[in-house]
C-alpha cells in the first residue's frame, strides 16, 4: 500500500472520544484489530509486585502520590512513570503490526511520543484527541456510559478531570514537538470525519 502503513495510534485522556472514533476509523478503513491501552495496563497490573511494574499499582490520576504532594510537576511525573511502562508494550505491539503488515489501531491515554522508538513513530499514523472546553469535556465524561463504557460511569473520572487535563497538556506539548496531528473534539461528527480524511490521505 502506498503512503503510510495503516498502523494507527490514537491518543487522548478519558472522555475525548478515543474508543468511539477508533471504532469508526476501523470500520471505514477495513482495519480489523483495535486495541485499548486500558486493557494493556490491566494485563500488566497483576505483575505490579515486580519492581519494574510497581508504578502501575495506583490509578494514573493518583500516580502523583509516589512523588509527594499533588502538584502539576508531580502529576506529570506520575503520568510519565506509568507511561514509560505501558509504552514499552505499545512499542512492541506497533512494531509487530509493522513487521507483519497487519493493520492495527491502538488507542491509549499514555500518549508520549518521546517514549516511542523514533523509527516506529516515523512509520505509524499518530493522532491525538482533546477537548479544549473543560465544561464540555466533563459533560462527555459523565455521558460516556451511554455510548461506550456501559458499566463504567464517568463521574468517578470527571472528579479527576483537572488531573487528567494536566496530562492532556503534557501530551499536547509532545504533539507539537513531534509534529503529531491534533484534533479538538468539540463537534464529534465533524471530528471523526476530519480524522478519517487525515488518515486516508496519509495512507494514500
Image (cartoon, rainbow, N blue to C red):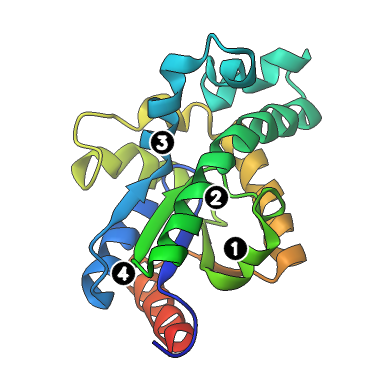
The quadrant of the rendering that contains the N terminus is: bottom left
Q: CA distance from mark 4 to mark 1?
A: 20 Å
Q: Secondary structure at mark 2?
A: helix
Query: Which of the two discs, 4 and 2, labels the residue nearer the N terminus?
Result: 4
Q: Earlier in the sequence, mark 4 or mark 3?
A: 4
- 105 vs 47, left or right, is left
Tag 3 secondary structure: helix
Task: Work out whether 178 lies above or below 18.
Answer: below
Q: Which residue was labeled with disc 1?
A: 120
Mark 3: few/some/many CA within 10 Å (<14, 14-19, 20+): some
Q: Quadrant of residue 190?
A: bottom left
CB under 8 Å between discs 1 and 3: no
Residue 146's spot in the image, x, y percent? 20, 43
Tell me where residue 193 appears, x and y as whole percent: 35, 78
Which badge, 2 or 3, comes first in the chain's sequence?
3
Residue 25 shows which numbered tag? 4
Question: Which is more N-terminal, label 1 or label 4?
Answer: 4
Picture quadrant of residue 87: top right
At horizontal 53% and vertical 8% (from top left) the residue drawn is: 49
Q: Find out whether the residues at labels 4 and 3 contact each other: C-beta distance under 8 Å.
A: no
Say which residue label 3 marks. 40
Query: Residue at left 44%, top 31%?
Result: 41
- Does residue 164 appear anywhere in the picture? yes
Bin the neighbour count of mark 4 within 10 Å (Cα to Cα): few under 14, some 14-19, many 20 and up.
Answer: many
Residue 16 shows in the view? no
Q: Are marks 2 and 1 in contact (CB under 8 Å)?
A: yes
Q: Dot 1 lies on which element?
A: helix
Q: Secondary structure at mark 4?
A: helix
Which residue is denoted by mark 2 in the rendering?
Answer: 91
Amino acid at each position: 500500500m502506498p503512503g503510510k502503513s495503516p498502523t494507527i495510534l490514537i491518543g487522548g485522556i478519558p472522555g475525548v472520544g478515543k474508543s468511539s472514533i477508533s471504532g469508526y476509523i476501523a470500520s471505514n478503513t477495513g482495519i480489523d484489530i483495535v486495541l485499548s491501552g486500558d486493557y494493556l495496563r490491566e494485563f500488566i497490573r497483576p505483575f505490579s509486585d515486580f519492581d519494574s511494574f510497581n508504578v502501575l499499582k495506583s490509578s494514573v490520576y493518583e500516580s502523583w502520590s509516589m512523588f509527594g504532594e499533588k502538584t502539576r510537576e508531580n502529576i506529570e511525573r506520575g503520568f510519565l512513570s506509568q507511561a514509560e511502562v505501558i509504552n514499552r508494550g505499545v512499542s512492541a505491539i506497533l512494531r509487530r503490526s509493522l513487521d507483519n503488515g497487519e493493520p492495527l489501531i491502538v488507542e491509549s491515554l499514555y500518549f508520549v511520543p518521546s517514549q516511542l522508538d523514533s523509527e516506529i513513530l516515523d512509520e505509524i499514523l499518530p493522532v491525538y484527541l482533546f477537548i479544549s472546553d473543560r465544561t464540555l469535556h466533563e459533560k462527555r465524561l459523565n455521558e460516556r456510559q451511554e455510548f461506550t463504557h456501559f458499566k463504567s460511569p464517568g463521574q468517578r473520572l470527571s472528579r479527576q478531570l483537572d488531573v487528567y487535563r494536566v496530562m492532556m497538556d503534557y501530551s499536547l506539548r509532545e504533539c507539537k514537538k513531534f509534529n503529531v496531528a491534533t484534533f479538538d473534539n468539540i463537534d464529534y461528527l465533524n471530528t471523526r470525519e476530519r480524522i478519517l480524511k487525515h488518515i486516508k490521505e496519509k495512507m494514500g
